């Protein structure tokens, strides 16, 4: 089931006896679990019928014993097992309960950063009687679209530059992204319905002139002065602009540029879809294709990988992140 389907069913009071929520992205796991915790029972019912447990401090047999109890003066009891990935040897015992779960119990497992194998008896049985949900980490290229959709769900527009500023600066951590976006929404004046780079700079602290998007834009134009200005700014602000976020932004740009060479004669809509970008940014790739050959682009991609390894201490024990970025940008531009 998708996240949207699960929330829709919960709102309609269509409950499953077990929710096994797993995967690398904790944001959706927490959203579903918190919705159950806050909405299935009313405040009075929660006193006797809602239990929060933690995998590290719990035994699976104790959890199952609690799940077999009947609710008191309510239609359901809710048991939420947080950090369920810390449970020890739970599969066989849980399988026995899954074979015949109590319909009045809603048992929720928050199994973060891991998954159970889909070939196991437990998973196959969970699929039949429970709600299994895998929350996958977004890829870098999926983040801009996700931010746009989140804004749209709040009836707010955001400029393409603003989307790229946020996605490049915040990475793929959805909880972090939502936290910063909510700051923007709260700070937006009542009559305004559009987020701009200036608004982001003022409320989140990302410079509208010196950020990862502006760096890739300067590189696409082979603007040596602007590129060096941004790199120097990053070097002086390594905490806010770590190499671990800057390298993926540069890599993604040149990886997409490599794809662009093979599709540049297609329509704008087809190019945008293939690259996973807003059509607004196609001109950036058109310009870069004139500045860099395909061979040079492949060389740059190899360089980025090399400097990624150097940033992790391979063949570079003393250079700072700022120094490594300066070297890389110099080699890209020359």
Image (cartoon, rainbow, N blue to C red):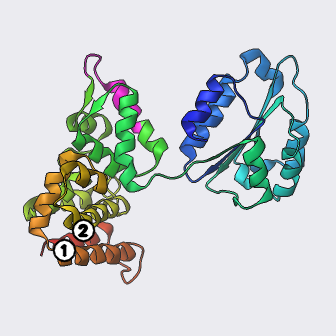
Question: Which residue was labeled with disc 1?
Answer: 294
Q: How would you rate the neighbour count of disc 2 (Cα within 10 Å): few for under 14, some for 14-19, many for 20 or more? A: many
Q: Residue at x 68, y 29 (%)?
A: 37
Distance Cα–Cα, label 1 vs label 2: 6 Å
Q: Please indicate whether residue 39 sits to the left or right of residue 296 in the image.
A: right
- Which residue reaches farthest bottom? 315
Against 99, is 311 above or below? below
Q: Please indicate whether residue 34 sits to the left or right of residue 231 in the image.
A: right
Could you say which quadrant of the image residue 223 lies in?
bottom left
Mark 1 secondary-structure assignment: helix
Magenta segment: 180-192
Instruction: Evaluate if marks 1 and 2 touch, with contact meaning CB atoms under 8 Å apart.
Output: yes
Against 317, is 116 above or below? above
Front-most of 11 and 124? 124
Question: Which residue was labeled with disc 2?
Answer: 258
Q: Please indicate whether residue 229 sits to the left or right of residue 71 in the image.
A: left
Q: Residue at x 40, y 42 (%)?
A: 146
Q: Residue at x 54, y 34 (%)?
A: 4
Against 177, is 319 above or below? below
Asked if residue 259 shows in the view, the reply is yes
Against 108, is 323 above or below? below
| Residue 13 locus on image (x, y percent) | 69, 23
| Residue 250 locus on image (x, y percent) | 27, 63
Asked whether 236 falls inside the magenta stretch, the response is no
- Which residue reaches farthest front? 266
């Amino acid at each position: 089931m998708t996240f949207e389907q699960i929330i829709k069913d919960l709102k309609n009071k269509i409950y499953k006896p077990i929710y096994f929520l797993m995967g690398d992205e904790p944001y959706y796991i927490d959203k579903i679990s918190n919705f159950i915790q806050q909405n299935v029972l009313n405040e009075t019912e929660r006193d006797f019928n809602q239990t929060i447990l933690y995998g590290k401090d719990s035994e699976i047999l104790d959890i199952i014993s609690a799940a077999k109890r009947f609710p008191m003066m309510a239609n359901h009891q809710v048991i939420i097992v947080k950090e369920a990935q810390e449970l020890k040897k739970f599969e066989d015992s849980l399988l026995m309960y899954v074979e015949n779960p109590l319909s009045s119990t809603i048992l929720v497992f928050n199994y973060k950063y891991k998954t159970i194998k889909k070939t196991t008896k437990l998973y196959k049985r969970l699929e039949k009687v429970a709600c299994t949900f895998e929350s996958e980490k977004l890829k870098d290229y999926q983040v801009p679209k996700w931010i746009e959709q989140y804004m749209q769900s709040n009836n707010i527009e955001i400029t393409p530059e603003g989307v790229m500023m946020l996605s490049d600066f915040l990475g793929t951590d959805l909880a972090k992204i939502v936290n910063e976006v909510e700051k923007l929404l709260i700070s937006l004046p009542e009559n305004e319905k559009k987020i701009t780079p200036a608004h982001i700079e003022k409320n989140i602290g990302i410079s509208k002139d010196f950020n990862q998007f502006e760096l890739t834009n300067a590189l696409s134009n082979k603007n040596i002065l602007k590129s060096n200005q941004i790199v120097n700014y990053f070097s002086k602000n390594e905490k806010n602009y770590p190499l671990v976020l800057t390298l993926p932004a540069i890599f993604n740009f040149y990886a997409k540029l490599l794809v662009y060479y093979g599709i540049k004669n297609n329509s704008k809509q087809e190019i945008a879809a293939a690259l996973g970008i807003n059509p607004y940014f196609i001109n950036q790739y058109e310009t870069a294709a004139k500045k860099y050959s395909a061979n040079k682009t492949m060389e740059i991609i190899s360089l980025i990988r090399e400097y990624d390894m150097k940033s992790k201490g391979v063949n570079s024990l003393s250079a700072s992140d700022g120094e490594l970025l300066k070297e890389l940008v110099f080699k890209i531009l020359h």
